[in-house]
Amino acid sequence: MVVDSLSDGTRIAQLLASEVTGHEDAFSVLSVVDSDPDVEPTDDGALAYAVAADDERVAEVYVQPDRARVEFLAHPDVTAEAASEAGLRVRPKAVRPPRTLVFVEDGAQVKWTLPAFRALVAALDAGEREEDEG
């Protein structure tokens, strides 16, 4: 039996964008912004697009030749935990403010990122409720 796997960073990023924009109910606050349809993967990762919530960037997606990388800008602890529990490779990025890097190395792993995006949306929603109550 032949097993096909998708390990093209650009295509993985495209699939991820489709998942984020295709789940209207769960991710209704999220949108793909600043996309570069002609992005060429680089070894360090080239910015393909950002994910925004209410016009604020909350994640960025970079393409490398053999994978995509999601950098969560908002709620890095929550997204790291969710992505790790989903079986994705996760590591912190030591910058100010801190970020969480999530590596998507195969097309099948795109679905594995959805719990991290759900956790992000929940954390954003909880933050809004706190602001409304405060």
Image: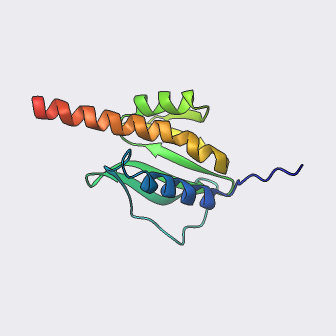
Q: Residue furthest right?
A: 1
Q: Position of residue 6 (x, y in %)?
A: 71, 54
Q: Which residue is more in the foreground, 91 or 109? A: 109
Q: Residue furthest left?
A: 134
Q: Quadrant of the C terminus?
A: top left
Q: Which residue is more in the foreground, 65 or 33? A: 33
Q: Position of residue 42 (x, y in %)?
A: 62, 59
Horizontal side of residue 7 vs 93, given as left or right: right
Colour basis: rainbow
Q: Residue furthest bottom?
A: 38
Q: Which residue is more in the foreground, 43 or 75? A: 75
Q: Is residue 96 visible?
A: no
Q: Position of residue 14 (x, y in %)?
A: 55, 60
Horizontal side of residue 115 vs 27, given as left or right: right
Answer with the quarter of the image where residue 31 lies.
Answer: bottom left
Residue at screen point 47% across, 68% down: 36
Q: Is residue 15 visible?
A: yes
User: How many marks are shown on the rendered structure?
Assistant: 0
Residue at screen point 90% across, 49% down: 1
Residue at screen point 47% across, 37% down: 116
Residue at screen point 19% across, 33% down: 129
Q: Position of residue 77 (x, y in %)?
A: 42, 28
